[in-house]
Amino acid sequence: MSLLEARGLSKRFGGVRAVDHLDLALAEGDLLGLIGPNGAGKTTAFNLLSGFLAPDAGEIRLRGRSIVGLKPHRICQLGVARTFQIVRPFPRMTVLQNVEVGALARHAGTGAAVRVARAVVEQVGLGPKANAVASGLTMPERKRLELARALATEPAVLLLDEVMAGLNPTEIERMVVLLREIHAAGMSMLLIEHNMRAVMALSQRVVVLNFGSKIAEGAPAEVARHPKVVEAYLGEEYVDAAPAR
Ligand SMILES: Nc1ncnc2c1ncn2[C@@H]1O[C@H](COP(=O)(O)OP(=O)(O)O)[C@@H](O)[C@H]1O
Ligand SMILES: [Mg+2]
């Protein structure tokens, strides 16, 4: 059984088919990359999976149980956590307090929430910034905070929406290392990412969206050479960037 599965998932905005009969399946421990041009429907797919938008059609199952129609906080409690492409921490709160908000999704008592939050803040490398206010963080620190807030909900599946956008190559390399650690510790992940090297290095499988539809799915090296993918998204120069397997 899949951990998280979508079948025929569809969402329109007026005349735009943002997500069009999308099938996705994530098994326990999978790290699935989701790529595609701007406007392909990636973020909308995350909004549907996490309950921030209701699908027009289709089914979403978490461990076999339908989660369509449930509120985002309920889906989060059931184990689906997501980050936002546009990071939005509570600016006046400290790093630790921001992460505690995530931990409170699962722990009613603040004592337990603080313990979880501290551990997660350390895990993402923000320990030295634990008591800094979020508004003073650099972009890479904000991206880590966004990741920490999602991790603090102790999810079964992590949906990451462009956590490397705005980072320089060194920061991207650090984020790749961090995500690899989190995955190695047992987390299942769906990763939306524009940085091809990063997504190809991390993913076991990659799904390519274009105009809301899946145009390819497979191992990173296969997908990077798929003619439809090269045409729609990558361009010839990326073919050589794919890892040889
Ligand atoms: N809330 C919305 N209202 C209207 N159109 C939207 C909304 N969200 C997304 N869209 C449209 O849906 C399509 C897919 O957008 P999005 O899911 O953000 O793509 P991606 O994340 O792949 O760049 C785009 O054409 C976008 O303009
Ligand atoms: Mg997006």
Image: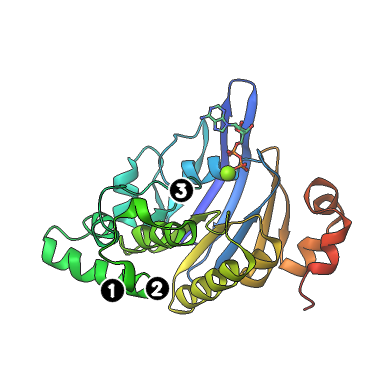
Q: What amino acid is labelled 1 in the image?
A: Ala
Tell me: 98 left or right of 205: left
Determine which residue is flagged by label 3. Answer: 84
Q: Which of 18/149 is in front?
A: 149
Q: What amino acid is labelled 2 in the image?
A: Gly
Q: Is mark 3 on a helix, strand or loop?
A: loop
Where 57 falls versus 83 (above or below)? above
Give residue 43's position: percent from left, percent from top: 55, 43
Determine which residue is flagged by label 1. Answer: 119
Where 15 falls versus 84 (above or below)? above
Spatial CA span between label 1 and label 3? 22 Å
Determine which residue is flagged by label 2. Answer: 125
Q: Quadrant of ligand 2?
A: top right
- At horizontal 42% and vertical 46% (from top left) the residue drawn is 50
Where 187 falls versus 155 (above or below)? below
The earlier-in-sequence mark between 1 and 2 is 1
Give residue 124's position: percent from left, percent from top: 40, 71
Tell me: 171 left or right of 60: right
- At horizontal 51% and vertical 70% (from top left) the residue drawn is 179
**Badge 1, how many Cα within 10 Å: few under 14, some, many 20+?**
some
Spatial CA span between label 1 and label 2? 10 Å
Is the CB atom of the residue marked by disc 1 within 8 angstroms of ligand 2's nearest atom? no
Q: What element carries label 1?
A: helix
Q: Quadrant of residue 22?
A: top right
User: Colour scheme of this structure image?
Assistant: rainbow
Is the CB atom of the residue marked by disc 3 within 8 angstroms of ligand 2's nearest atom? no
